[in-house]
Amino acid sequence: MDLSIILMIVGILLIIVSFFFKNSAKKVEQDVEELSISIFQETNNLKRRLKIVEEELLLEPEFQVKSPSAQNNTVANPKVQQVMQAVQQAAQASKTGQATPKTKPIHQIIVSQVLELNKQGLSVADISIRSNLTEEQVRQVIANGGR
């Protein structure tokens, strides 16, 4: 037989055989697409959850993470409790030490922040914590209306 006829028969046989086999590339392509969609959805869920956690942390400025081992040590060891109380008292004393009125001008941005927080209904103590001003300074800003 002639070589060209043999090649033509082989080609026709290969074409016929190719109809019987499924295209695995399409299946792989679909799997990759489904995987990318699921990763995208999970990423969006994580971003949403992270945003919620960030908002909660912004609402609670005194938020502190306490480890279980630290709690067990304070309960078991009264000396540790005494030291912790002393540290807390020192921190409160430093806050009250800062409460001594200094005639330092308050920046206009902080004044507008204090007024906005007051409009939102926050207490003077909360506004004081968030703006790093004393409660007396916050009361003065609110009373003056920002002037």
Image (tube, rainbow, N blue to C red):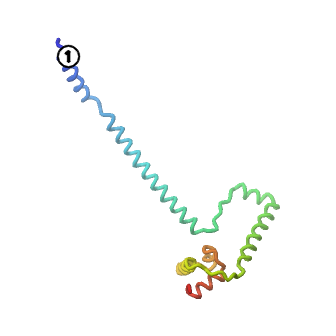
Left of 95 or right of it: where is 119? left
The amino acid on which the numbered mark 1 sits, given as a three-letter code, is: Ile
Q: Is residue 80 above or below residue 120?
A: above
Left of 44 or right of it: where is 109? right
Quadrant in which residue 97 is drawn: bottom right
Q: Residue at x 55, y 81 (%)?
A: 115
Q: Is residue 74 above or below residue 103?
A: above
Q: Quadrant of the C terminus?
A: bottom right
How many numbered marks appear? Answer: 1
The residue furthest top is 1
Q: Position of residue 15 (x, y in %)?
A: 22, 26
Q: Residue at x 68, y 59 (%)?
A: 66
Q: Nearer the viewer, residue 43 or 96?
A: 96
Q: Is residue 89 above or below residue 24?
A: below
Q: Position of residue 46 (x, y in %)?
A: 49, 55
Q: Residue at x 48, y 57 (%)?
A: 47
- The local secondary structure at tag 1 comes to helix
Q: Is residue 54 above or below residue 115?
A: above
Q: Position of residue 51 (x, y in %)?
A: 51, 61
Q: Quadrant of the N terminus?
A: top left
The residue furthest right is 79
Q: Residue at x 66, y 83 (%)?
A: 136
Crowd around label 1: few <14 · some 14–19 · many ≥20 (10 Å): few
Q: Position of residue 8 (x, y in %)?
A: 19, 20
Left of 24 or right of it: where is 133? right
Quadrant in which residue 129 is drawn: bottom right
The residue furthest front is 104
Residue at mark 1: 6
